[in-house]
Image: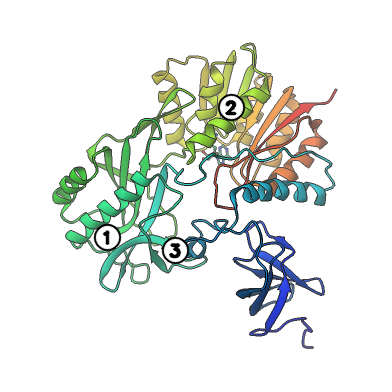
Amino acid sequence: MKLQLPVHKNEHRTGTVTDLTYEGNGVIKVDHYPIFIPNALSGETIEYVVTKVSKNFAWGRALAWQTKSADRVELADQRYLQTGIAPLGHLSYPAQLKFKQKLLVDLLAKAHLPLEVAPTLGMKTPVRYRNKAQVPVKLIRGRLETGFYKRGSHDLVPIEDFLIQDPVIDQTIVAVRDVLRRHQIPAYDEQTGRGVIRTVMVRRGYYSHEVMVVLITKTKHLPAQQALTAEIVAAVPELKSLVQNINEKQTNKLLGDQNRVLWGQATINDQLLGIDFKISPLSFYQVNPQQTEKLYQTAIEQAKLDGSQTVIDAYCGIGTISLAVAKHAKKVYGVEIVPAAIADAKQNAVLNGIDNAEFVVGKAEDQMAKWQAAGLKPDVLIVDPPRKGLAESLIEAAGQMGPKKIIYVSCNPATLVRDLQRLAAVGYQVTQPIQPVDQFPQTTHVESVTVLERQK
Ligand code: SAH
């Protein structure tokens, strides 16, 4: 039997956008059947063509606007929308902040959780904030190019001004690209598996201004290594570290496990809330330093630490939250799955003369159970998990340990809402409005802090 759908492919239609999805696409409904349309905003009436249909939804492309949203910003460069560098770049910043708050509100309502969400804490200047860039390298019509992939593809769009990155990082990428071009270093080709350079990664300390350049290569051998090194050193005045990272696998994973220092140091330094951090090529480090300080400050204030508490920082990375909290606590325990990150965390503690923080390599869910068995009684548990959220076993261990407070730093509202329900089942209730903090302006990512307290 042929399915009866309310629209068909290549059909031209007119409609009014009623909502924006979590990916930033406009939604037009035809008899309850949703059509997702990129670059269309709530309230806009548009003419569009249906580009793809499936059983439960369709995709469309906007062709003309009969009315435009007052929140629309005309982007000078459409490539930012096309490539996913700035998927919300067409929405005014105040409206972006409201969008992020509403996303949480809607998910909570759907889960029947009557919780308040505070207005999103935004940035004063919501562009050029990223302290890190990873850009693919490709040969296009015989020329080595750096840029960004078109959304949902591996078609490289050459770009020099990335809008959301530290401008010195943009300049560094162009300088490195020009050196690679001069020496005709072959770009890696995903199809054939041949070539040398896959990706250029650049980090720059927000306070320190120290620059790290990582050349990610398919091959161990780097042609013209000496000349490349000398020319990159000459072209990037703030360079402190030049590293070759070798990724021999034919995969989408960006970085390999092997690093070779070509010039300078193996790490760069930067500060967060006045604490020094050493950052190596493979470690996770928050990409928006200004907002990260606001995020951590919010978490620390909400934990109401007075120097007498024991704190666990699960998912601690290189110890950024742990070390920021250590000043305000009696003792901090951090756990993290990546051994190199824990090595960095320990070094960072020494570097800052902090002696009340202890770091362990492990899965947070396993280590929590071990700590619990060993009789550790934390007052506060801080969790900052990856997108998939908390493991069920971690929630059980937390319930048995019984900290007075849990501070949940989340980068994914969907798993946050799921976990809040699970935490309620082991005795924890949200006691303050959930606080979204905008870590990624111009994008659809939503970061937030939630405080939970143990119910008597
Ligand atoms: N709090 C840190 C890191 C947060 S990112 C910061 O703000 O910088 C999440 C971290 O969790 C990553 O460092 C990742 O390596 C780690 N991780 C992922 N799964 C884990 C697990 N099961 N147990 C412990 N750590 C994990």
- Kind of residue indicated by mark 1: Val
User: How far apart in space, not on screen, are marks 2 and 3 (Cα)?
Assistant: 35 Å
Residue 402 shown left or right of residue 239 in the figure: right
Residue 448 x, y percent position in the rendering? 65, 39
The residue that label 1 is drawn on is 196
The residue that label 2 is drawn on is 297
Few, some or many residues within 10 Å of mark 3 (<14, 14–19, 20+): many
- Helix, strand or loop under label 1: loop
Instruction: State the mark number for residue 149.
Output: 3
Q: Earlier in the sequence, mark 1 or mark 2?
A: 1
**Which image quarter has ligand 1?**
top right
Instruction: State the mark number for residue 83.
Output: none
* Residue 215 seen by the camera: no
**Residue in front for this viewpoint, 148 or 241:** 148
User: How far apart in space, not on screen, are marks 1 and 2 (Cα)?
Assistant: 43 Å
Picture residue at 40% right of the left edge, 66% below the top: 156
Q: Where is the N terminus found, in terms of image quarters?
A: bottom right
